[in-house]
Amino acid sequence: QVQLVESGGGLVQAGCSLRLSCAASGRTFSTSMMGWFRQAPGREREFVAAISQSGGVTRYSDSVKGRFTISRDNAKNTVYLQMSSLKAEDAAVYYCAARSNVYGVLSQSGNEYDYWGQGTQVTVSS
């Protein structure tokens, strides 16, 4: 069992940066690939980024590649999403997710993740 708690959301101006954190409890964090997803009002949930268990492999959606960076600290049971050059279209509720004991290709499908946080709101003003 993994429990996930996101933090770090808020209101920022376009072009600014924000760092989201996701703290995990439970004993399987280090064996879980982690992902960030987001959902804007009236839109489907979409993949943002994912990171392997070791942190050595990452994957991004085309819409955030080059602007967002996912990282993790297994000693702190925390995964981060550093967001830079934020745009109005980045505004959404951001969720972190964990997929336990699966190695290999980083999943972009939310259906393949086992555990989810409650989400944190990111609002971008233009």
Image (tube, rainbow, N blue to C red):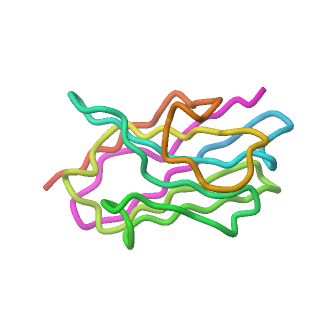
Quarter occupied by residue 84 = bottom left
Residue under the image location 23 percent in, 30 percent down: 41
Residue 101 vertical placement versus 43 (above, below) = below
Residue 108 vertical placement versus 73 (above, below) = above
Q: Which residues are magenta?
A: 1-21
Question: Does the magenta portion include 2?
Answer: yes
Front residue of this view, candidates 22 and 111: 111
Which percent across, then down, holds residue 55? 69, 64
Front residue of this view, candidates 67 and 51: 51
Quarter occupied by residue 27 = top right
Residue under the image location 68 percent in, 49 percent down: 33
Question: Does the magenta portion include 43?
Answer: no
Residue 97 vertical placement versus 30 (above, below) = above
Query: Taking 59 as reference, is 17 left or right?
Result: left
Query: Taking 24 as reference, is 34 left or right?
Result: left
Quarter occupied by residue 75 = bottom right
Which percent across, then down, holds residue 44? 30, 32
Residue 56 vertical placement versus 21 (above, below) = below
Which percent across, then down, holds residue 45? 36, 35
Instruction: From the image, give the main secondary structure of the stretch colored magenta.
Output: strand
Query: Taking 89 as reference, is 85 left or right?
Result: right
Total residue callouts? 0
Which percent across, then down, holds residue 99? 67, 39
